């Protein structure tokens, strides 16, 4: 007797340097969520990522799932890297149709949907692109946490730590910041140059900026960060004057008051500001599924 085929499922994953979140949608059931550590193929090992996926999807029947899997990941903008991640996930989910895209495409689909707009990411790092409702039409390159990531948590941490070590940080902020980095310069060098996840380390200091956002120094730091992103990215697009500017990411979400002020000063049209794209990505893919769910 032939067993009936299992109903198709939809799996959507979103990964940055800090965390990876999966949403599993089965017919007629409440979507499930799974979380694991962050992944960027430029900085993290494929073996470690695969092991975390196996832990997140611990039940043996996951290997038998069929349907569609979409994975959005920072660092997957280059074809070779995207293909490597796609092959890895295809091995882990052999019966799924797997598609891997960079996280910026996820931001565009989540915020713009089928409409044109400028999609931006402000989280651990930063990125942007012009999206016509179907595909990328223009993109200012992202230069990573050493040369770029303007307006991101990395940018905030970088500016804050420079001010601290160059003795430019106001006295009333020095002591509370020192408590977060008791090892001083030696700890800083170790975390930046000899440990995994230096961008995540820098971005963690965005929490300090948030706690002291009303302090004149931190208020100016936020303004400088967001103004730097708008000038380096958004205003480089000729469509910026007429297309809405959307944002995805924890930094954009938690500091949207300061971000919106900078956008207004630049005469830009704010669009959606999402902390995470997954809910909207699930809606997008349910509307564009190969097999109905």
Image (cartoon, helix red, strand yellow):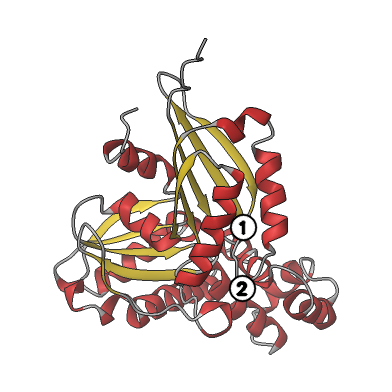
Residue at position x 67%, y 65% in the image: 44
Q: In terms of depth relative to the viewer, which is nearer, 246 or 67?
A: 67
Residue lying farthest top? 1
Q: Where does label 1 land, which residue? A: 18
Q: Is residue 228 above or below residue 152?
A: below
* Snapshot quadrant of residue 146: bottom right
Q: In terms of depth relative to the viewer, which is nearer, 250 or 159?
A: 250
Q: Nearer the viewer, mark 1 or mark 2?
A: 1
Q: Secondary structure at mark 2?
A: helix
Q: Is residue 32 above or below residue 241?
A: above
User: Where residue 92 sits: x, y (%)?
Assistant: 61, 45
Q: Secondary structure at mark 1?
A: loop
User: Where residue 8 sits: x, y (%)?
Assistant: 42, 29
User: Of the numbered discs in the image, which one, if any, rests on residue 157?
Assistant: 2
- Quadrant location, the C terminus: top left
* Snapshot quadrant of residue 209: bottom right
Residue lying farthest front? 1
The answer for how far apart the CA atoms under marks 1 and 2 are is 15 Å
Residue at position x 22%, y 62% in the image: 117
Q: In the image, 66: left or right of 287?
A: right
User: Of the numbered discs in the image, which one, if any, rests on residue 251?
Assistant: none
Instruction: Using the rendered image of the protein, determine whether residue 213 is visible from the camera's viewpoint.
Output: no
Crowd class of label 2 (few under 14; some 14 to 19; many from 20; radius 10 Å): many
Q: In terms of depth relative to the viewer, which is nearer, 104 or 77?
A: 77
User: Where residue 158 sits: x, y (%)?
Assistant: 61, 78
Q: In the image, 256: left or right of 44?
A: left
Q: In the image, 179: left or right of 248?
A: right
């Amino acid at each position: 007797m032939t067993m009936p085929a299992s109903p198709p499922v939809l799996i959507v994953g979103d990964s940055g340097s800090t965390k990876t979140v999966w949403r599993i949608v089965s017919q007629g059931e409440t979507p499930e969520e799974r979380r694991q550590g962050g992944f960027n193929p430029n900085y993290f090992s494929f073996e470690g990522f695969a092991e975390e996926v196996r832990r997140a999807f611990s039940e043996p029947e996951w290997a038998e799932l069929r349907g569609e899997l979409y994975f959005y990941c920072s660092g997957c903008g280059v074809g070779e890297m995207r293909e490597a991640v796609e092959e890895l996930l295809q091995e882990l989910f052999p019966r799924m149709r797997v598609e891997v895209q960079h996280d910026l495409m996820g931001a565009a689909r989540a915020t713009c949907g089928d409409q044109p707009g400028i999609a931006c990411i402000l989280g651990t790092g930063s990125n942007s692109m012009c999206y016509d409702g179907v595909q990328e039409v223009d993109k200012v390159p992202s230069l990573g946490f050493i040369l770029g990531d303007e307006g991101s948590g990395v940018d905030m941490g970088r500016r804050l730590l420079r001010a601290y070590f160059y003795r430019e940080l106001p006295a009333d902020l020095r002591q509370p910041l020192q408590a977060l980095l008791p090892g001083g310069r030696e700890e800083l060098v170790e975390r930046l140059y000899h440990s995994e996840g230096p961008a995540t380390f820098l971005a963690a200091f965005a929490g300090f900026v948030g706690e002291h956002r009303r302090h004149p120094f931190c208020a100016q730091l936020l303004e400088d960060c967001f103004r730097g992103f708008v000038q380096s990215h958004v205003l480089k697009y000729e469509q910026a004057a007429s297309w809405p500017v959307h944002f995805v990411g924890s930094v954009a979400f938690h500091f949207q008051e300061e971000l919106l002020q900078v956008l207004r000063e630049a005469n830009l049209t704010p669009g959606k500001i999402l902390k995470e794209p997954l809910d909207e990505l699930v809606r997008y893919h349910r509307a564009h599924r190969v097999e109905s769910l």
